[in-house]
Image: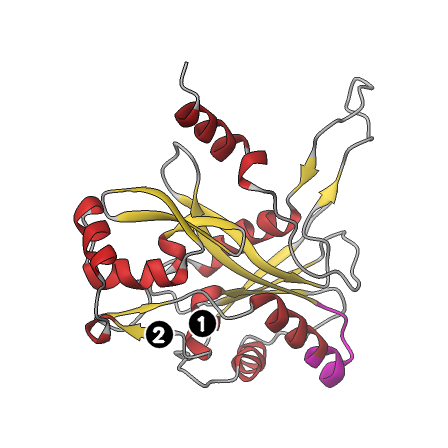
Amino acid sequence: MRQFQIFGLQTALIKPGDSLLEHLYAAFDTQGLVLQDHDIIVLAESAVATAQGRIIELQSIQPSEEAREVALQYDIEPALAEVVIQESDAIVGGIPGFLLSIKSGHLLPNAGVDGSNAPEGHVTLLPADPDALAHDLRKTILEKTGCVVAILIIDSRTHPMRYGSGGVAIACSGIPAIIDERGRKDLFGRELKVTRRAVADNIASAAELVMGESDEQTPAALVRGLDIEFGEFEGIDLIAPDECIFIGSLKKAYITPP
């Protein structure tokens, strides 16, 4: 029987300029955990962004005319609209309270700008260069402990036409983020044509069960025992909007309605 373990890692409150590794090592010691080869360390993007100082006070933002128009259309604060516009590569729509953005190839609400787990009147941005950070953390751990591990930085996302949110990886280093199942056979011998397993996203969702979303103060998790290849794997494969079944279909419907 295949099985694995997930340990939530409680830390002190993370502040700008803090060392993420020091917080992780302290959590290991407090919880009696010893890092092992082929462990996977999962980090919440809000904790990473906070350590990087990626926190903005909304009162310090001067909204542009575009931001005021967007804020009026989608019923959000003008200052927040300005930050989201600045953080987005493109804004593709929205609903009251949220803008739907594309940032670095990811489709996400408000370009990842989030007021939860931030001081009153502030918002956190997505981490700067999360892929490079995940790589550097993995290499530093290897140098300091000799352990071959993987690092995931994760966020929460909603799914089309479903309540609730699940985990999604925004950075992955040390394991393949996607495992291509094309060419394998199903239970009845038919060849799989399109199936790819979103391994990093699945791990992110599992880790969120112990990390939580509110005041748990558990910004990281340790995943142990997964039967997966470890190595010099970096990044997450993304697809273009036109190739996405959701965005591509909606775009086609709006541009060429029946």
Identify the residue shown where x is 80% and y is 63%: 231
Query: Is residue 176 on the magenta stretch?
Result: no
Is residue 237 found left or right of 159 in the rendered image?
right
In this rendered view, identify the residue nearer to me: 122 or 202: 122
Q: Is residue 85 above or below residue 23?
A: above
Amino acid at the residue labelled 2: Ile
Determine which quarter of the picture holds residue 145.
bottom right
In this rendered view, identify the residue nearer to me: 201 or 97: 97
Label for residue 49?
1
Q: Which residue is mark 2?
A: 55
Mark 1 surroundings: few (<14), some (14-19) or many (≥20) residues within 10 A:
many
Does any portion of residue 106 appear in the rendered image?
Answer: yes
In this rendered view, identify the residue nearer to me: 56 or 176: 56
* Alpha carbons under labels 1 and 2: distance apart: 7 Å
Does any portion of residue 114 appear in the rendered image?
Answer: no
Q: Secondary structure at mark 2?
A: strand
The secondary structure making up most of the magenta span is helix
Identify the residue shown where x is 58% and y is 42%: 240
**Which mark sits nearer the N-terminus, 1 or 2?**
1
Identify the residue shown where x is 49% and y is 27%: 249
Identify the residue shown where x is 78% and y is 79%: 146
Where residue 174 appears, as percent x and y from the top left, is: 72, 63
Is residue 204 found left or right of 77 in the rendered image?
right
Q: Secondary structure at mark 1?
A: helix
Q: Quadrant of the N terminus?
A: top right
